[in-house]
Amino acid sequence: MFIFAIIYFGIISDSGLFRPFVKVMIKFTRGNVIIVAVVTALIGTCAQLDGAGATTFLLAIPALLPLYRALKMSPYLLVLLLALSAAIINMVPWGGPMARTASVIGVDNINDLWYQVIPLQLIGIVLVVLFAMFLGMREKRKIARTYSDMDREKVDIQSIVEGYEQQQNENSPIIGEAAKHKYILWLNLILTIIIVAMMLLDIVPPELAFMIGVAVALPLNFRNVDYQMERIRAHAPNALMMAAVILAAGVFLGILNETGMLKAIALSLITILPTAVGPYLHIIVGMLGVPLDLLTSTDAYYFAILPIVESTAGQFNVPTESTAFALMIGNVIGTFVSPFAPAVWLAVGLAEINMGKYIKYAFFWVWGFSIIMLIIAICLGIVTI
């Protein structure tokens, strides 16, 4: 599924599907600081639908950075809002966190996990919009204290939109039939909705849905066979890398399980853990998910920490899925604040900010948001105590 999902969304991104939405959102802001913050969060949620953080930052930051500069808004706020909104959407089945979680706990149909977190994602989107409003008001007061009206530029929204379009055409031009026929964008949107609907309604397995999507999207957007092969070659490395990680993790965890090493580690931990802590171990580690993401890589968190916590918590009759959800929800919100994530370095470079200052600016906001999301998951029954 991951191979075809990544290739499919790569093709759709090449067609320029999300660009009209970004341009409409920029025009909608009309230079209002609070609306700009909210629009940033909304763009982040839409841009992250392909499950790739790099795409989100490449699409959003060049579009919004001139607007932030003209309004004297902090570029750190721009990256923070994109990071939070993208992290919520990153729980989709074709995203890395959900794929790793399913691999670790041995779930074959990843949709079974996704269905359970969809309500949490919807609540998370509402929360991030409210949070963006709060930070937007905070930023507006800060700007009013720091700059006079004379210091602030008169914002020319149309020139910002034109500059964004020119930059996007230079860096990642729309190619294929979508460049010639604008109705192709609507067909791509309809196709994407149909594929997601087939997954949600469980009409076909996810892997088949994306196979069909690639089979339709390729000839729809690229009539020439050479162009089709070129697009597959362009997106195949990312797709195969994700699949290779999942396969390697399966082998690694299989060895740990079959040799009894994982059980031995869990039993050793039980002997030193206070009895009262055991049933809540998954909650404790989940709440520490964001700090742990700064100390370990994403793969180390999911393929080393999660199996040990799951095995240990299982000795206290904590359901496997509950442990998996607690650790994933606690960690996924911090995905784009970790220096181990390549996409974060891309965002820092595009926004022309400092990594250390970004972590200092965003860390406690992100950590607090992750704890709130985990508490909501407990209230919804996704994570059990």
Image (tube, grey):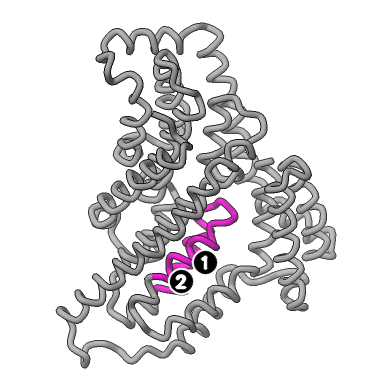
**Marks 1 and 2, how far apart at CA:** 7 Å
Residue drawn at point x = 46 percent, y = 37 percent: 381
Q: Which residue matches tag 1?
A: 59
Instruction: Return the residue nearer the eye: 100 or 314.
Output: 314
Which image quadrant is residue 149 in? Answer: bottom left
Please report the bounds of the magenta region as a residue range: 38-65
Tell me the kind of residue under disc 1.
Leu
Name above or below for residue 278 compared with residue 48: above
Which quadrant, please, contains the C terminus?
top left
Which image quadrant is residue 374 in? Answer: top left
Q: Which residue matches tag 2?
A: 62
Name above or below for residue 150 compared with residue 95: below
Instruction: Return the residue nearer the eye: 351 or 323.
Output: 323
Label 2 crowd (10 A; few <14 / some 14-19 / many >=20):
some
Instruction: Return the residue nearer the eye: 362 or 226.
Output: 362
| Image-based side of 294 in relation to 173, left or right | left
Label 1 crowd (10 A; few <14 / some 14-19 / many >=20):
many
Residue drawn at point x = 33 percent, y = 92 percent: 154
Secondary structure type for disc 1 = helix
> Given contact means CB atoms under 8 Å apart, are the residues at marks 1 and 2 in contact?
yes
At which x and y percent is residue 259? 52, 6
Residue drawn at point x = 70 percent, y = 60 percent: 193
At which x and y percent is residue 10? 65, 56
